[in-house]
Amino acid sequence: MKKLDLHFNQALQGEFVLRKLNFLFVFQVNCPGCFLYGIPFVNELHNEYNKDISFLGLSTAFEDFDYNNETNTNLLINSGQIVGETKKAMIEQGFDRYPKNIDFPVAMDKMADESFDFSIAAAKICQINPNYKIWPEFEQRALLKKVIEYLKSQEKIALTFILNQLKGTPSMLVFNDSYEILFEQFGHVENTVVTTKLESLIDTYGKDC
């Protein structure tokens, strides 16, 4: 089972405590869909299921680094200030600041620094491919080289986003206390798809007391 490689420093809001079931909401501050759909929906999920599931919102960045950063994430949390395309979308809705509170804990995806090892990171990414281990060695080496080149071409690297090869934002994942990913969803989906899955997982893993 694929495992979540989760990286963040101190939470910017609230506290994330690992439990039997955990919900991760990955967003960018310059992502209108994250604000029009993602945050309101995750607020609803948090208010409904937080007794049985730990929630964490992870602000990440795979583009538009002038917007998608810790400074703007803090401004969002503390004052509802929004930027870029998100601000344009909210102004069209009649708001110059984000009109909703964020009810769940929030942290910033950890950014790679000078200690980042491209070879180790590339190996982790290669392992995501379920067939990688059975490929001939020359094909494994070719993919590893290609991934290293890809990583080195990136302007910046947000560890959780890159190491898990997430497709974009908003992304929602559910994982257990061994960090095994039990559910993963990118983009907009009918709310009932997520709630049905959460209720099924709660039934399987049991309610937290």
Image (cartoon, rainbow, N blue to C red):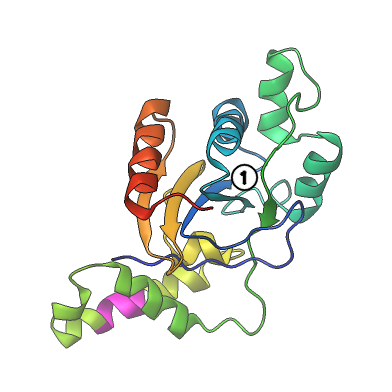
Q: In this figure, which residue is indicated by the disc labeled 1?
A: 28
Furthest toward the right, the residue is: 79
* Left-right relation of 165 to 48: left
At x 39% / y 30%, what residue is drawn? Answer: 189
The location of residue 66, given as percent across then percent down, is 73, 50
* Left-right relation of 97 to 180: right
Q: Which residues are magenta?
A: 141-146
Q: Amino acid at mark 1?
A: Gln
* Left-right relation of 2 to 18: left
Task: Say above or below: 149 vs 115.
Answer: above
Q: Residues within 10 Å of mark 1 (few under 14, many from 20)?
A: many
Residue 190 visible in the snapshot? no
Quadrant where the N terminus is found in the figure: bottom left
At x 73% / y 27%, what residue is drawn? Answer: 100
- Report the label total: 1
Residue 182 covered by magenta stretch: no
Residue 7 visible in the snapshot? yes
